[in-house]
Image: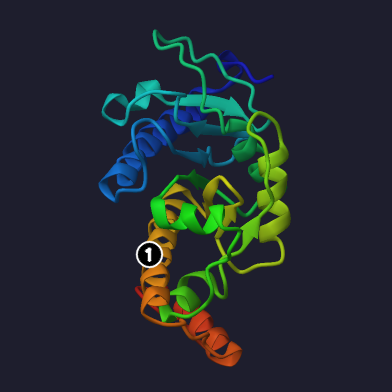
Amino acid sequence: MTLWTDLTAEQQALVNETRQRVAQLHQHLPANNLVVWTAGNVSERVPGLDLMVIKPSGVQYEQLSAQTMVVTDLYGNKVDCGEEHDLQPSSDTFAHAYVYRHMPQVGGVVHTHSTYATAFAAAHQPIPVVLTMIADEFGGEIPVGPVAIIGDDSIGEGIVETLKTSNSPAVLMANHGPFTVGKDGLAAVKAAVMVEEVARTVAIANQIGQAQLLPPDIVEKLYARYQHVYGQQA
């Protein structure tokens, strides 16, 4: 297990920068109505180290700070940073850690119980690719993962197995809620915001009439353009 004293001063600085960033990222969840009370969490991989930073369990969002963020290794073991705050990590820590171990391209993970996306998860229904925004952001339907219990690797396994055959950075874990991944914490937070937005729109569309699928060739073109042309690409 990694000890704080095993890290160089430069590595400790990287950890502390990540803690500051993750604390700030958490504010996007209540701001976008993705969580209630203390539910939900953001984590980010510490660049170049087999460590991650995640929200503490059961702490209200207004009480979060860089100092309250919890550092663990990629098996969910807490790293003692020798500070006055001695908080336990999120109950979803093992799921996040499993994703980092098995998806090296992932640098950030987010979990919410946002209303519309969680409603699709409760119904075991993927979000179909009926909007250009879904094609752009998710490259196809947003899939449903298996029922899994909190406390071990089960949720992480379900996330990894579901996403390995999908373009989507989001999975709707059945009877639970959405998990999103990204190259860093900000990208994962963006995916969490977008999955709730499209879930809400699709749910409303289906109240008006049957939402219509985009043709696969159009989905492919939209996804390729958005991923490689849209925005301030290098």
Q: Residue at x 62, y 59 (%)?
A: 144
Q: Is residue 137 above or below residue 144?
A: below
**Which quadrant of the figure contains the N terminus?**
top right
Q: Which of the 4 image quarters holds residue 151? A: top right
Which residue is label 1 attached to?
200
Colour treatment of the image: rainbow
Q: Position of residue 200 (x, y in %)?
A: 37, 64
Q: In the image, is 138 to the left or to the right of 165?
A: left
The answer to whether any part of residue 103 appears in the image is: no
Q: Position of residue 226 (x, y in %)?
A: 45, 78
Q: Which of the 4 image quarters holds residue 67? A: top left
The answer to whether any part of residue 219 appears in the image is: yes
Q: Residue at x 29, y 51 (%)?
A: 32
Q: Residue at x 53, y 90 (%)?
A: 218
Q: Looking at the picture, tell me which residue is in the foreground, 197 or 16.
A: 197
Q: Position of residue 82 (x, y in %)?
A: 47, 9
**Residue type (three-letter) at the residue carrying disc 1:** Arg
Q: Looking at the picture, tell me which residue is in the foreground, 5 or 196.
A: 196
Mark 1: few, some, or many residues within 10 Å (few <14, many ≥20)? some
Q: Is residue 33 above or below residue 224?
A: above
Label 1: element kind: helix
Q: In the image, is 104 to the left or to the right of 52?
A: right
Q: Position of residue 109 (x, y in %)?
A: 52, 46
**Which quadrant of the figure contains the C terminus?**
bottom left
Q: Residue at x 54, y 85 (%)?
A: 219
Count of labels in the image: 1
